Structure formats: C-alpha cells, structure tokens
C-alpha cells in the first residue's frame, strides 16, 4: 500500500515498534504528521524537555496517513494528526477521525475563526499576488478579482487548480462573491494564463522574476524563504518581485493554516491534549514564525523574522477556516468547468 513508503521513515524515530493494541502511556505521544519541515524538530525536542513526553512520529502525505488511520481503526496507535491546509483538515474531520477537544486554553488562545470543535490551526500563511515590477502596474492587481482583468492576458501564472491552496481560495471566493461570480473569475483567470499551470509556488515566483509571467498567486511561506535567502541569485530574484495584499478594502487577504487535532482512538489522550496546547504556547508560536516563516495564530506574539517583518501588516480574511469545506467541492467543479486544472 502507498503508505508503507512513509512508514519506512518511522524507523529513525522509534515508531516502528508501534503495533495495534499498543498500551497507553503517559510519557508517550504518537504523532502522524504531513508537515515535512526539518525545523519542526525543535518543536518536538522542546515539548519533550518541558513535559518528559517522548514523541514517536510517522511522516507521510496526507492521503496516505489518513488511509492508514482509517485502516488501523480502533487499534490505531496514533494520538495526533497534523497537516497543512484547512481543506485537508476538513477532509480528515469529514472522515470522522478526530475527537472533540475540551480545552479552555486552546479555545482562549486560538481565535474562533481558526479552529473547530475538533481541530485547531497553529500557524497561518497568506495567499498573495506577486508581480514583476517592470511589467505590471500593481494598481491593476489590488484584488483577486483583478487577476481576471483582460488587461492581464498572457501574464498570469499559477500552480494547478486542483491543489488545496487554490481550492481553499476558490472555496473562500464562493462564500464571499457567490458561485456565479467565482466561476466568471475562474474563466477570466484561465483566459489570462501565460502558460498552463505547473510547478509549485516557488516556481511561480521564479517565473515572475524571470519575466515569464507578469503576476502569480503564491503563499507567503515560499516568499519568506526567498526573502530571507543570502544567495546572490535569490536576492536578485526578489528585487524584481513586488507583493500585493489582495482585497484590503473588502474581505481581506485569504489565509491558510497548519493545524491538527486529537484522534478519536488516541491511546494517549492526555498527552495529545498537552501537545496541542503546547503548539499554542508562546514558545511554539514564536518558533512557527521565526523558525518556519509562518504567522502565529495567537495574538500579541512578537515576531523576529526579517522576511515577515518586511512583508508588513495586512488585513486577513476572517472567514472561519472550518467553513471552507462547505464549498471546496463546488470550487473544484467550477475550476474544472473553467479549464483551471
């Protein structure tokens, strides 16, 4: 099965010893994670230092991990599932793998629009518009809707319309603009493509800097990595690229999240709740920002990340991220009809 490839990664972190029927232990947390950042090691290490709870983890792709959780059923050793993107978290919720978490601490620290009864966001990224400073007037692209303006014909680059980052944006636009206007937008966007969608967000940034595209949609996480780079080629690249926070005079810039929840059959529920609460602590929130170029969800956290500071403050869309699942399927249908694939 596909998830077996991911399971091989577990050997280096001790998860290979887990088996169905594993006994609960207060000093162990079994984590299934689709976050693949080496920088997260510090989060795990610090949690263990603070609590004495050892983390066993398995890393893999979201679908593989969810399939594993479902196959393991009530015998699953997994305590917590973490992934990137609200639509993926919502999918896990729809599959019924999460348990409700009754934590006054989490409910107090994580804003209401960034959690549900079963999962919590711990960091955010924004989906912004970037442009080639020599090719496009940023006055044309102050909104997502502006990307469908015929004046941008042959200038728009973006990754696949089936990617969760774009589906989440489409789902949000349906709720703000309605399905008909969102479909008209998608058709206009496709009509303006400089090339067929391909690559990831970093590829879009490089294409804009190289003049292959005039504008693109990207997540700030990828921008910040390049803005913090000291490589001459990447410094020169970012000098050519401008950033626009879309829809500052309307519903705000779309954001997406990293988050997670406790699993329904978690054998170590106390440790699972402690871990989720730790991710919302000041220490962990600072790390998301300074270590991995993501914004904290907890208000008042001081960020010391040059790239995030350079990007500045912005008005974020306050749409509850849990609602994105309500229109994600419709967004995919709209994108398919518009030829945004």
Image (spheres, rainbow, N blue to C red):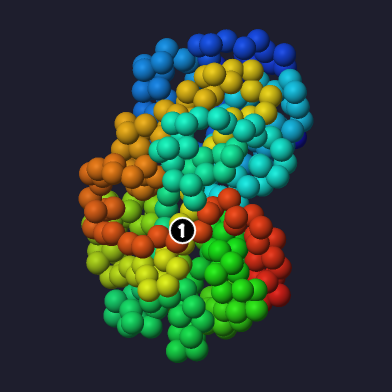
Residue drawn at x 76%, y 27% is 73
Residue shown at the point (33%, 82%) measured from the top left: 139
- Confirm whether residue 37 shows in the render: no
What's the residue at 59%, 67% (across, down)?
175
Where, quadrant-wise, is the N terminus in this rendering? top right
- Quadrant position of the C terminus in the picture: bottom right
71 lies above or below 112: above
Q: In terms of image quadrants, where is residue 226?
A: bottom left
Using residue 247 as the reference point, say whether residue 231 is left or right of it.
left
Asked if 69 appears above or below 228 in the picture, the reply is above
| Relative horizontal placement of residue 216, taking residue 180 as reference (left or right) | left
Query: Where in the figure is residue 83, as x and y percent of width and height?
Result: 55, 41
Give the image quarter of residue 108.
top left
Q: Is residue 280 left or right of residue 167?
A: left
Q: Nearer the viewer, residue 116 or 140?
A: 116
Q: Residue at the spot x=28%, y=44% of the render?
A: 300
Neighbour tally class for label 1: few under 14, some 14-19, many 20 plus, Cα within 10 Å = some
- Establish if 155 lies above or below 120: below
Q: Nearer the viewer, residue 210 or 253?
A: 253
Residue 75 image point, x, y percent:
74, 20
Image coords of residue 169 (percent x, y): 54, 63
């Amino acid at each position: 099965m596909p998830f077996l490839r991911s399971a091989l990664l577990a050997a280096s972190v001790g998860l290979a010893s887990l088996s169905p029927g594993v006994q609960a232990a207060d000093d162990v947390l079994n984590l299934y994670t689709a976050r693949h950042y080496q920088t997260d090691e510090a989060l795990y290490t610090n949690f263990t230092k603070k609590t004495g709870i050892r983390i066993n983890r398995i890393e893999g792709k979201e679908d593989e991990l969810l399939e594993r959780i479902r196959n393991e059923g009530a015998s699953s050793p997994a305590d917590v599932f973490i992934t990137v993107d609200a639509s993926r978290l919502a999918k896990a919720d729809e599959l019924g793998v999460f348990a409700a978490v009754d934590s006054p601490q989490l409910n107090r620290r994580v804003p209401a629009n960034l959690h549900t009864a079963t999962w919590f966001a711990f960091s955010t990224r924004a989906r912004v518009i970037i442009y080639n400073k020599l090719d496009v007037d940023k006055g044309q692209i102050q909104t997502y809707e502006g990307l469908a303006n015929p004046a941008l014909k042959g200038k728009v680059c973006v990754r696949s319309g089936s990617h969760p980052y774009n589906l989440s944006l489409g789902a949000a636009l349906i709720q703000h603009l309605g399905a008909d206007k969102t479909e008209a937008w998608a058709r206009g966007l496709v009509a303006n493509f400089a090339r067929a969608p391909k690559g990831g967000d970093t590829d879009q940034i490089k294409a804009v800097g190289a003049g292959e595209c005039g504008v693109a949609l990207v997540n700030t996480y990828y921008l910040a990595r390049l803005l913090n780079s000291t490589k001459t080629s990447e410094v020169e690249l970012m000098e050519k690229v401008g950033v626009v926070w879309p829809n500052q005079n309307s519903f705000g810039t779309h954001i997406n999240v990293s988050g997670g929840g406790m699993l329904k059959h978690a054998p170590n529920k106390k440790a699972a709740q402690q871990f989720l609460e730790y991710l919302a602590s000041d220490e962990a929130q600072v790390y998301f920002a300074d270590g991995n170029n993501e914004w904290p969800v907890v208000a008042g956290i001081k960020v010391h990340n040059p790239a995030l500071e350079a990007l500045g403050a912005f008005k974020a869309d306050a749409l509850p991220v849990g609602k994105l699942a309500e229109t994600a399927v419709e967004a995919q249908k709209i994108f398919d009809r518009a030829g945004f694939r």
